Amino acid sequence: MNTKQTITAIVPAAGVGSRMQHSAPKQYIELAGKTILEHTLSKLAELNELNTIRVAVSDDDGYFADLPHIDKRIERVSGGKERADSVLNALLSLADNPPDWVLVHDAARPLVCLADIQRLMTECIAANEGGILASKVKDTIKRGHTHSEQTVPRDDLWQALTPQFFPYQALTDALSSALKNGVTITDEASAIEWVKQPVKLVAGRSDNIKITTPEDLDLAAFLLQKQQNESTS
């Protein structure tokens, strides 16, 4: 991608991942000989478009310092209680020399395709609006608590993925405002939606899964091997 825009990646990695039922936070669980976070950061480090990569980790994190050196652009910043707090902390750490754009990516999505990220950045910069990687919902969706009450039409339903890519100032302002007003923020796009700014949907590969449960780890190991085979064939 040819652009003179400055771009910083932000990786919120302060969570504990309780659903993984593991002693270490999920981003430090081993996957094919490396921690999940190492896989994710190594993937982002392949993007020459990035000026810096800010990783938001808990102040009492005892694992990050032991990771092997991956890229000189990687810097640690203090994470927050929730994902949105971690992202905002990372954004504010850039305030003295802010980038034009920020690329926020989940620590637990090591399988993201580089071509998808580059297409996201290219399309958003060309349109001058933020956007996210997303995949069309394939399954039949039901609404209900203990029993199905309604089948939800899926024609216009998308599953939000990461990275999510927004102008620095727009995302900083939106997150700050939303958190001050007690708005529940599940991802960066939800903050931008709350201030009624556009969020472009860019189709991404559905194997860009988020590792959340032990079953996800098994699937990720299979998909990682499949991707590695594809890259060498």
Image: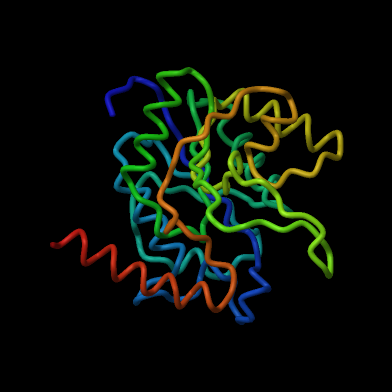
- Front position in the image: 198 or 63: 198
- Front position in the image: 65 or 16: 16
Residue 50 percent location from the top left of the image: 37, 36
Q: Quadrant of residue 13?
A: bottom right
Query: Is 4 on the left-hand or right-hand side of 228?
Result: right
Figure quadrant of the N terminus: top left
Vertical position of residue 131 compared to residue 25: above or below: above
Q: Quadrant of residue 156?
A: top right
Vertical position of residue 33 compared to residue 128: above or below: below
Give the residue drawn at x 69%, y 45%.
Answer: 84
Vertical position of residue 139 compared to residue 50: above or below: below
Most extreme residue toward the right is 181
Residue 64 percent location from the top left of the image: 50, 64
Residue 53 percent location from the top left of the image: 44, 44
Colour pattern: rainbow
- Front position in the image: 144 or 220: 144
Give the residue drawn at x 21%, y 61%.
Answer: 230
